[in-house]
Image (tube, rainbow, N blue to C red):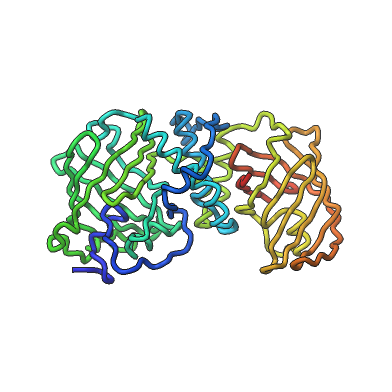
Amino acid sequence: MAVGGYPAARLAFGFVQPSSIGRPSASPPSIFRFPCRKSRLTKRRRPTFLRPILSSLVEKGEQKLSFTDRESVLVEALLGIQGRGRAASPMQLQALAFFDVEFAVETLESIGGLPDPTSSSMIEGCWQLIFTTRPGTASPIQRTFVGVDFFKIYQEVYLRTDDPRVSNIVRFSDAIGELKVEAAATIKDGKRILFQFDRAAFSFKFLPIKVPYPVPFRLLGDEAKGWLDTTYLSHNGNLRISRGNKGTTFVLQKTIEPRQRLLSAISVGAGVEEAVEEVISSQKLVKIKPETLGGEWQLLWTSQLENESWSSVAANGLKGLQIINDGRLENFVDLLPGLKMCANGSLNKTPDGGVYIARMDDGVIRLGALGFSLKIEADIEMELLYIDNKIRITRCNGSTLLVHLRLK
């Protein structure tokens, strides 16, 4: 029995994956797509592990969310590709972060976390999927659900009950509901869980009953079976790395830190300002060194774009790429393919803490190799609300909020 030409058991979202059927169809870049593992490790220089600026955050008032240095390296790398925002270039962000994620995952696996994770109570509970590889053999159902930023993917693991289970959950939204695919689970050893999918159902907020998903698991045989190895489980039980029976890698967390929630909110276009406030309040900005601002920043989100002229958009950095270097600021906006606008100016810090004045005094519109001068005169107040080695939040001219992601 199959759904859409593929066995229905592949609703496991990668835990049970199909063998190759014909030539896999090409799919667009996704935050869940992972390049081949072999070539990059030999061709690219492995990054040096640095202590992240943010290794500990306070969440929900009292709960302390903390990571070891090497766990923080993985979380920092994931910030470059998850919840990337509609304004960012997926290929650009992937090129910067995928290698870092892969290397951080392999490093954690090599040093090990809790021994015999399947025997630990830390593995129990509800885990949110933060990142997964996605081979070309992934089923259309897996690509549909896992590859959509708007959906949140969870995995429940409960092994110490009379009915041990591993369940995968697609949460469409708080207003719509979810799809839950359940599997009977058995512990094989300290690392591996064997499972067999046996039921699935939709839970819609607007219906009083669950709607069974029409999948005859009993007739699928081995197609409904699989295994999951936990290759790393953090000592505080918040971070888990697992590998499935077809080689897929999964990174899951129980508690999501504020910056991750912000990027997720930007991706779905909902609750961004609330997430911004949470990030700002998670760590007070004490002192910002001028060199911290330097680099290339991709704008992910702004609170105001309507009724803005293109010159105003460029001057204020409300779209595109921003480069800060040696007291100079450049804002780049791609108007059309081959047509780019650039606004330049000086950036000076005021005596008032994290407030900067950007004095835009020059502009150009480029069409291929041709350049046309653009008259831009604007003084812009930039209040730095939050910054670390990945995320920057500023308030422009006292009202407009901007969220940038560091590219370099």
Displayed quadrant of residue 369 = bottom right
Left or right, 296 with reference to 342: left
**Number of numbered discs visible in the structure rendering:** 0
Displayed quadrant of residue 3 = bottom left
- Residue 393 appears at what percent x and percent y? 64, 44
- Residue 89 appears at what percent x and percent y? 58, 57
Look at 31% across and 56% down and name the residue there.
13
Q: Looking at the picture, tell me which residue is in the foreground, 382 or 73.
A: 73
Residue that extends furthest to the bottom in the rendered view of this protein: 4
Quadrant, the C terminus = top right
Residue 126's place in the image compared with 287, above or below, is below
Quadrant, the N terminus = bottom left
Look at 19% across and 53% down and name the residue there.
225
Look at 53% across and 57% down and name the residue there.
269
- Residue 374 appears at what percent x and percent y? 84, 62
Left or right, 349 with reference to 267: right
Residue that extends furthest to the front in the rendered view of this protein: 42
Residue 136's place in the image compared with 231, above or below, is below
- Residue 207 appears at what percent x and percent y? 29, 63
Q: Looking at the picture, tell me which residue is in the foreground, 273 or 346.
A: 346
Displayed quadrant of residue 12 = bottom left
Q: Looking at the picture, tell me which residue is in the foreground, 54 or 339.
A: 339
Left or right, 321 with reference to 125: right
